[in-house]
């Protein structure tokens, strides 16, 4: 049964990536970026940064908010704090005075262990951070959040999600334990360290130091549990969805007439689209479809809604209120890009459905 949609609406929700654990070796202060190998993080994604020792970010102008990551000696790769401002060359006195603090303290620079930003991923897989999605998609170097040379030891980057999800990430971050001090400096997923995050909602998370999982403000983290959201696919010319339920012969030996039952229900189809990069609130350009093919592990699937009739109010005629669409998950299996003289660059892809296929109708 083919379902054709000329300019039909397609809504997608991709899988959220696994949180990744990053080390100071991934930091580049010259470009204000962190090197991230995981390809599931895309430009425009909202992410959270968590670090027990603080973040290499200066939120109030007093210095990076990671007091234990400052240098003590001149010439270190790490930044010297205000407590060592008297050291400007190798011959300067190591100690300042009787009342000068020897170590950088939270009172001087602050401590920020959790923050939310939008990211931009460049062609070298370097991720920079922005305070709004439009700036992140543009990747303007002048609007990046500055990153400082601070030894933050371990930093967890995770997709933004609900309050419960983010509290679980914070709890896992604080359970890294000796892993943060091991010889392994490669990027790994947080799931390999904290495989079973807590799911409880009671008792309420504490707010005391070293026990703070009550993240504020709540408004910035109250998205879906997996940090993803539904978007309308832009620049789509047409799509087709083919559903199939092959029969299985169950006729007994000696019966005069055949008997069959349905086998599994499968689906697949194709899409034609124009290749374009654009920024629309609540929508995605066609690079989303092209990137889905390149994903092989988590992040390769996407929830999909193939809309045939949009939501509408009740009318006096026979048309019923509500909408009509198929809901399923899809895997992109092939893509093709066509370039012709004096024509727009167009693409096409083939996909297969995975999991349940449901026909939704009516009003919510």
Image (cartoon, grey):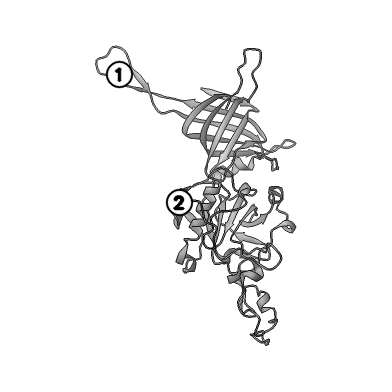
Q: Of 16 and 202, which appears nearest the observer?
A: 202
Residue 10 point in image, percent of width and height: 61, 32
> Looking at the rendered structure, which numbered label has been put on residue 299?
none
Mark 1 neighbour density, 10 Å: few (under 14) some (14–19) many (20 or more) = few
Residue 16 point in image, percent of width and height: 54, 46
Q: In which quarter of the image is residue 34?
A: bottom right
Instruction: Identify the residue at image location x=58%, y=53%.
Output: 215
Residue 167 point in image, percent of width and height: 52, 52
Instruction: Identify the residue at image location x=59%, y=44%.
Output: 223
Question: For the image shown, how many numbered marks are present on the structure?
Answer: 2
Image height of 64 relative to 311, above or below: below
Of callouts 2 and 1, which one flags the residue occurring earlier in the amino acid sequence? 2
Instruction: Identify the residue at image location x=48%, y=69%.
Output: 181
142 displayed left or right of 259: right
Q: What element carries label 2?
A: loop
Image height of 58 relative to 255, above or below: below
Q: Of 93 and 333, which appears nearest the observer?
A: 93
Q: What element carries label 1?
A: loop
| 2 or 1: mark nearer the eye | 2
> Looking at the rendered structure, which numbered label has been put on residue 251?
1
Instruction: Return the residue at label 2.
Output: 198
**C-alpha distance separating marks 2 and 1:** 51 Å
Q: Quadrant of residue 258?
A: top left
Q: Disc 2, disc 1: CB below 8 Å?
A: no
Task: Say if residue 91 shows up in the picture.
Answer: yes
Residue 311 point in image, percent of width and height: 63, 25
Task: Say if residue 189 shows up in the picture.
Answer: no
Q: In which quarter of the image is the C terminus?
A: top right
Q: In which quarter of the image is residue 80?
A: bottom right
């Amino acid at each position: 049964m083919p379902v054709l949609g000329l300019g039909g609406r397609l809504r997608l929700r991709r899988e959220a990536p696994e949180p990744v654990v990053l080390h100071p070796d991934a930091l580049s202060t010259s470009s204000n970026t962190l090197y991230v190998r995981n390809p599931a993080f895309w430009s425009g994604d909202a992410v959270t940064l968590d670090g027990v020792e603080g973040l290499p970010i200066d939120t109030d102008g007093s210095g990076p908010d990671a007091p234990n990551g400052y240098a003590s000696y001149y010439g270190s790769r790490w930044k010297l704090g205000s407590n060592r401002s008297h050291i400007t060359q190798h011959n300067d006195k190591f100690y300042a005075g009787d009342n000068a603090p020897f170590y950088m303290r939270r009172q001087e620079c602050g401590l920020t262990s959790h923050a939310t930003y939008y990211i931009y991923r460049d062609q070298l897989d370097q991720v920079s951070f922005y305070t709004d999605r439009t700036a992140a998609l543009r990747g303007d170097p002048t609007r990046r959040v500055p990153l400082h040379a601070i030894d933050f030891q371990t930093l967890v980057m995770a997709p933004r999600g609900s309050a419960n999800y983010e509290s679980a990430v914070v709890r896992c971050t604080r359970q890294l334990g000796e892993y943060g001090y091991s010889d392994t400096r490669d990027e790994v997923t947080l799931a390999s360290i904290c495989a079973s995050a807590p799911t409880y909602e009671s008792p309420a998370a504490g707010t005391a130091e070293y026990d703070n999982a009550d993240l504020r403000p709540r408004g910035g983290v109250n998205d879906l549990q997996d940090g993803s959201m539904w978007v309308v696919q832009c620049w789509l010319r047409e799509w087709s969805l083919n559903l199939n339920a092959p029969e299985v012969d169950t006729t007994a030996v000696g019966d005069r007439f055949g008997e069959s039952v349905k086998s599994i229900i499968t689906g697949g189809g194709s899409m034609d689209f124009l290749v374009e990069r654009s920024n629309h609130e609540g929508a995605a350009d066609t690079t989303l479809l092209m990137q889905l093919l390149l994903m092989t592990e988590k992040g390769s699937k996407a929830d999909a809604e193939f809309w045939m009739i949009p939501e509408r109010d009740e009318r006096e005629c026979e048309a019923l209120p509500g909408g009509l669409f198929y809901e399923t998950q899809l895997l992109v299996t092939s893509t093709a890009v066509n370039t012709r003289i004096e024509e727009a660059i167009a693409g096409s892809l083939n996909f297969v459905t995975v999991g349940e296929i449901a026909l939704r109708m009516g009003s919510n």
